Amino acid sequence: MFPQFLKEEDVAQVIEYALIIAVVSIGLVLALQSSTLAASFGNFIGRVATCLTTGPCV
């Protein structure tokens, strides 16, 4: 069943798209780490985490 699943073209396209998304995501993370956007992005993530855990959002 699994080998037949891998032979289907639709599955191959989904895997290709997933790999493209993964590479682009890694590139974005690396770009944000070295730029000044990293601080503001970190603050944003911190605010979201606060909203999700404690409730009051600022």
Image (cartoon, helix red, strand yellow):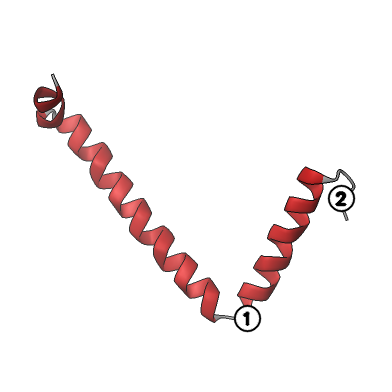
Q: Which residue is mark 2?
A: 57
Q: How many numbered marks are there?
A: 2
Quadrant location of residue 24?
bottom left
Q: Residue furthest top?
A: 1
The crowd level at tag 1 (other Cα within 10 Å; few <14, some 14-19, many 20+) is few
| Secondary structure found at label 1 | loop
Q: Amino acid at mark 2?
A: Cys
Which residue is rendered at x = 62% and y = 75% of the image?
Answer: 37
Which residue is rendered at x = 86% and y = 43% of the image?
Answer: 55
The crowd level at tag 2 (other Cα within 10 Å; few <14, some 14-19, many 20+) is few
Q: CA distance from mark 2 to mark 1?
A: 24 Å
Quadrant location of residue 39?
bottom right
Q: Residue 42, position in %: x, y?
A: 67, 67
For the C terminus, the image quarter is bottom right
Q: Residue 26, position in %: x, y?
A: 41, 63
Q: Residue 27, position in %: x, y?
A: 40, 67
Quadrant location of residue 1?
top left
User: Cβ–Cβ below 8 Å for labels 2 and 1?
Assistant: no
Q: Earlier in the sequence, mark 2 or mark 1?
A: 1
Q: Residue 29, position in %: x, y?
A: 48, 66
Work out whether 27 lies above or below 58: below
Which residue is rendered at x = 76% and y = 44% of the image?
Answer: 52
Q: Amino acid at mark 1?
A: Thr
Q: Is residue 53 left or right of residue 41?
A: right
Work out whether 38 lies above or below 7: below
Work out whether 28 lies above or below 14: below
Q: Is residue 2 left or right of residue 45?
A: left
Q: Which residue is mark 1?
A: 36
Which residue is rendered at x = 56% and y = 80% of the image?
Answer: 35
